[in-house]
Image (cartoon, rainbow, N blue to C red):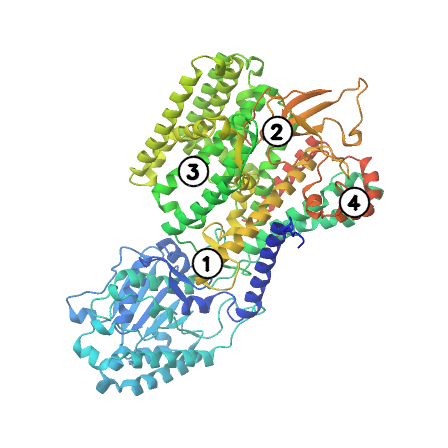
Amino acid sequence: MANTTANPLWPHYAAVAAIALALVAGLFRFLVLDALDPLKCSALLTQGQWLDSKHKNWQPEGCMMHPYKPKDVSTCFPGRRIVFAGDSVTRSLFFAFAHLSDPSLPSEPPKDDYQKKHADHNLHSPEGDINFDFYWDPFLNSTRIKSMLHGDQTQGEKPALLVLGSGLWYLRYPQDSGGLAGWEGMVDQTFAAIPQALPGLADRVVVLPVEEPVISKLSPERAATIHLGDVDAMNSDLMHRVSRMSKGTSMWGPTPLPTYPIAIPTILNKMLLEDQTQDGLHFSSFVLSQQANVLYNFRCNEALPKYYPFDKTCCNSYPQTPFVQLFILVLILAIGPFVRFVGPHLVAYKPTIAGFLPGNDYLIPLTIFGGVVGLNFLADRTAIWMKEQKQFDPWVFTGLCVLSMVAGLATMKGKDKDMGLLNRDQTDEWKGWMQLAILIYHYLGASKISGIYNPIRVLVASYLWMTGYGHFHFYYKKADYGMLRIAQVMVRINALTIILAYVMDTDYVFYYFAPLVSFWFVIIYGTMYIGHKYNENTGFMFGKILASAAVLTYVFKSQWLIEFLFGILNRFFAIRWEAREWMFRVTLDLWIPYVGMLTALAYIKAQQLNLTDHPRFPMALRTTIGASVAGLVWFFWFELRQPDKFVYNGWHPYISWIPVLSFIVLRNCTPYLRSVNSRAFAFVGRCSLETFIMQYHFWLAADTRGILMVLPLGTAWRTLNMIVSTIGFIYVCHHVAEATGWITNWVCGTPRKARIPPPAVQNTQANGRTEEAIPLLPADQIGAPKANGSSKTVVFDAEAANGGPSEPGSASGTGGQTVVAPRPNGDVPQSPAGRPRWLERLAERPGSPGPGWSPYIATRNRVFGAWEEAAAQNPGLNLTVKGTCILVVLWILNLVWPS
């Protein structure tokens, strides 16, 4: 029997299938299943469940409820009037509704005075000038109610919301009310009058379902006449009447809300909890406040201002996309096809304009980048996919962490030689498992759990430590303070973030990680550049780092200077950033980047002094290992003892370095540990920046407030939804990371590689490491020998400009001069000359004619060959002009952007 092997591209096919399934399922749900309820109004009123055992998180089917605060209510009902009319059940909901709008208002009716309970009530909220009226009418047959339903305007101004509730009193007193027959007659009259009285009756009319009592807790008198069978029959009758009145709505209709005049929130009965009532009829304020929140979401979600975060997806339409925002989206989506079809003509007839465009090598990366940005917009600015609320579960959190750890350990790969302290694979692995922990933390909404929040803060600090260590190491060893390096780092880090800020109409600082890393790069660059001629002086370097830390501490602790600078940005550049939020983000990790710089300095000096060869080094190492173990144990003991995360935040800037350095020591304490790494973690680590940013819209939803439901299977299938969305999310992040690297190359003017790269060149270093090497020559001179027969090669041994560490002085060459140099940026795909690019490798299949061959390459050469030759004579604008043009365009966009 012939041996069969799995297609090596099966992960690619699986990921593409997951994305295709999500798109098809989302469109099918939106266009077919939810065609009559595209805004999830009906789902809000009729479907839902408790997500937690403590019944604190109510989840409507397929949408997100907004927890209403007094400020929201005053925005929805400024100077308006709210009217409730009905029995004691309606009265209880009335007080909960009013109390939610203003905590100073009573949350329940008077308990002792029977006359006051069974009477009208009027409450006034000064905040928003809102009047709440309750009319005691348990049978809904009083003259006042009949007059109101028939359009009598003497009852007061038109209510913003009219809520009617009755039913149980008909069952409780059948002789006085006529029982079920009397109730049916009242409903006939009410439902006939309401459509005739609209729109003057009220903005929205809600008829409450007949409450389902807890029979076991009813008094004998009530239990004798109130039966669940009668209640069910009454509610079925109500829903049958509404279904006949409903005209329906579709995605093509102009009306953003359901067109039927009466809403019946039958879901209120499903929210009742047996342990939250004493008499079987009247429930606790906890349940009533949740029910009141459903009514607020139904009435107010569409009325509140529409800006991010869009966490009100029940009964709410997304705002119409402004022209400027839509133009940017279309431009990003079309740039790849534009280069493909228009670029060759511009090169021939308008070479000056063509200088602004990238060459054909960037066609696929630009198309992927634009497609991914469009996917983010589709996910979080349209109703194609549903959004639901997060729910923390300690068992799910633990299980996901264990599964991630198993995947990481199962893909451990060792090498024969010591790879050195903080080698590239190890730092990718470090970033990878930290990012997975952060993703799980965000997906489950674990930020409220102090014992989890605190270690996650340390993981963010670890990224900033790597930023300080890596950039310091580069500038100390290379002393390259040119503009190219700055551009490579800043464009690579910020390209996706800035584009998303405009396309999603959010805020640059909203994606705080990229701004934070960029800010620290600028600080480290300035610290290293000032007096850089004397950087070799250890005392001077140490003092300069401390001085930089002192100045930055003063600036952020005094606050006024940051607020002044942000005011200037707002006034002259229309950049509206929140100064307090930025100060919180920076001061929370104010000193950990400096710890990274000092660590790099200490490591470099230790190498120069050969301290590892000192006779007492083994003893010092054992002492350091013991101290590291003690440091980690102490940290977890300390952080778990803090009463809440706010108290821990005060300690975090002073102690975060302890677990970070402890982990580094323990992870690198033996040659074996330095020679092994996890391929799964390293894979995620290489696109950690993209996963951190894109989770805001594509994996999570509602600008991180919820989760994205790509499968229309309902809340019960969250696990399957998470699996499908995670596969697509990681795959997309991986490819957009490489595409962003190519875009960085174009913006920064990095020479393009040859169309069909020659076979890979390997450089084996003295310490046994095998690194990919590329010649330090222009693309058109690849492989050309130097006059003296030698070649100069750059070995990618140092870490990324994004902050990864490197091992200096570890390369040696034979037959030529080999120079150790860091990658221009850790995630910029500087593909070796002999290695096909990612899409070319993806297209390779067994039986290809030779290395680097693929149908994609053949097609590309046939289509673009002539254009590439013409474009080679017009390399484009230089870096300074490109950068200036980009900044001017961003400034103009800020000025014309709608407020």
Question: Mark 1, residues whose alpha carbon is within 10 Å: few (<14), some, or many (≥20)?
Answer: some
| Separation (CA) of disc 2 from disc 1 | 43 Å
Q: For marks 1 and 3, give the CA distance.
A: 36 Å
Q: Residue 479 at what x, y percent from top left?
A: 61, 19
The residue pinned by badge 4 equals 849
Going from N to C along the chain, the mark reached first, 1 or 4, is 1
Q: CA distance from mark 3 to mark 2?
A: 27 Å
Give the mark, 1 or 3, whose residue is nearer the N terminus.
3
Which one is nearer the viewer's eye here, 695 or 789? 789
Quickly name the residue at label 1: 718
The quarter of the picture where residue 291 lies is bottom left
Under mark 3, the amino acid is Arg
Q: Which residue is mark 3?
A: 580
- Percent x, y for residue 546? 45, 19
- Mark positioned earlier in the residue sequence (3 or 4): 3
Q: Nearest to the eye among marks 2 and 1: give it.
A: 1
Q: Amino acid at mark 4?
A: Pro
Residue linked to disc 2: 486
Q: Can residue 291 be seen from the camera position used here? A: yes
Which is closer to the viewer, label 3 or label 4?
4
Under mark 2, the amino acid is: Ile
| SS class, disc 2 | helix
